[in-house]
Structure formats: structure tokens, C-alpha cells
Image (tube, rainbow, N blue to C red):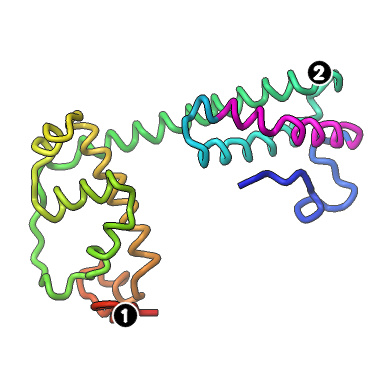
Amino acid sequence: MAFKMTTKKTTPKGVSLSGNPKLDPILRTALIQNRKKFLQFLNQRVGNKELGEDILQQFCMRALCKGGDLKKPESVVAWLYRVLNSTLTDFYRSEAKRRQREAEYARAQPDHIQEFDVNPKTVCMCFYELIPTLKGEYSEILQRIDLNGETHALVATDLGITLNLVRVRLHRARQAMKQALLMSCCKSCHEAGFMDCECTHRGKEHCP
């Protein structure tokens, strides 16, 4: 997910993102020349290459848009690192808020599975086919808790993690499964909440 230093498709001709046309070439050149260092800086702190690329994209756009704040072009790299740190700080704050919301949601969930009056023959079978496509820890927790009926406490003990982490992981796994189902299943399945399946994917066939 490399950032391309061009505004031909996104910015009208003659328009400067920074508000100072003379600074734009300086900023782009510095961003291109130091891209690997910026990405390495991010990867060392977030520990995830894809996430590092996403933050780098945000950083580059912010740097170009805030370029008018650059007072000394000769110190552009030092200025860019300040913008990079600011972008990373904002990311951490956003992540902290997201995790707090997830934790609050997870704490509100019951430890036992709620029983539903459904016909297992009509429940969308995409669920079972999509489980192996999810992240390993997500597929495992869905299999154990949602399919096998194991309690949160038992899974937490077996995995050596806290009960709260089990709840957060289960919440994330269910969200990932929801997105996978929305992308995979028929419209009729969506409307029925995946409880009255009309998909024709039994076996190797899939509905359009």
C-alpha cells in the first residue's frame, strides 16, 4: 500500500495542498527520499507492516496538507518527524478509544450462550465454511464458544488469557464473521439475519 507522491488525480491543477506551491516539491521529495525510514519508524512501534502502511498514508496526507506550517525548508525532515509523531499519537488515542468501547461491550455480554429457537437445517452454512478463512485466534474462539458451547471462563483458562480478553476477542471475531457473511451470502440471507438460508452453496456451489 505504497503512497504515491502525486496529486494529478486528486488535486486540481494549480492547487497546492500545503497552501504554498513552493513548498510542495520540497515536501514530496523529502517524503519520497525518507519513506523507508518513516515506515521503519512506524513498524518498530506498531509491530504490523500493514498497519504501518496505513499510518504512513495518513502521515503523508497530513504532512502535505500542513506543509504551510513549515517555516524552514532546510529542516523539512525534522519537521516531518514531528508530524509523524503527531500522527502516531493520534492513532494510539483512536485505538485506545476503540479498545475501550470493545471492552465495555465485552463486559456487558453474558458468559453463557443465549439459546435461539432456530432450525439448524436452515441456518446459513456459510458460517461453517467461512470460519477457516478468518484469523486463527478468531476461528478458534468462534468454534469453541459459539459452536461447541464452551464457557468464556473455560476458554480463558485453557488459553492462559484473561476473561476480559476472551470477551474482546470473541467480539472482534463475531464482527469479522459478520463482514465475511455480508460479502459471501445471498441478499435473502442478509434480510433473514442468516437464519433462513436460501444460499445454493451446499457443497461447492455458491449463490451469486
* 161 vs 58: above or below: above
**Residue at mark 1:** 205
Residue at position x 35%, y 79% from top?
207
Q: Where's the C terminus, which quadrant?
A: bottom left
Residue 80 placed where, x, y %?
72, 25
User: Which span is picked out in magenta?
Assistant: 21-42
Decide: marks 2, 1 in contact (CB < 8 A)?
Answer: no
Spatial separation of the CA atoms under disc 2 and disc 1: 60 Å
Residue 83 placed where, x, y %?
67, 25
The three-letter amino acid code for the residue at tag 1 is Glu
In the displayed structure image, the side of residue 130 where residue 70 appears, left or right: right
Q: Please, what secondary structure does the residue beneath circle 1 have?
A: loop
Observer-nearest of 56 and 43: 43
Residue at position x 61%, y 22% from top?
85
Residue at position x 40%, y 36% from top?
98
> Residue 170 colored magenta?
no
* 80 vs 153: above or below: above
The picture quadrant where one finds residue 203 is bottom left
**Residue at mark 2:** 75
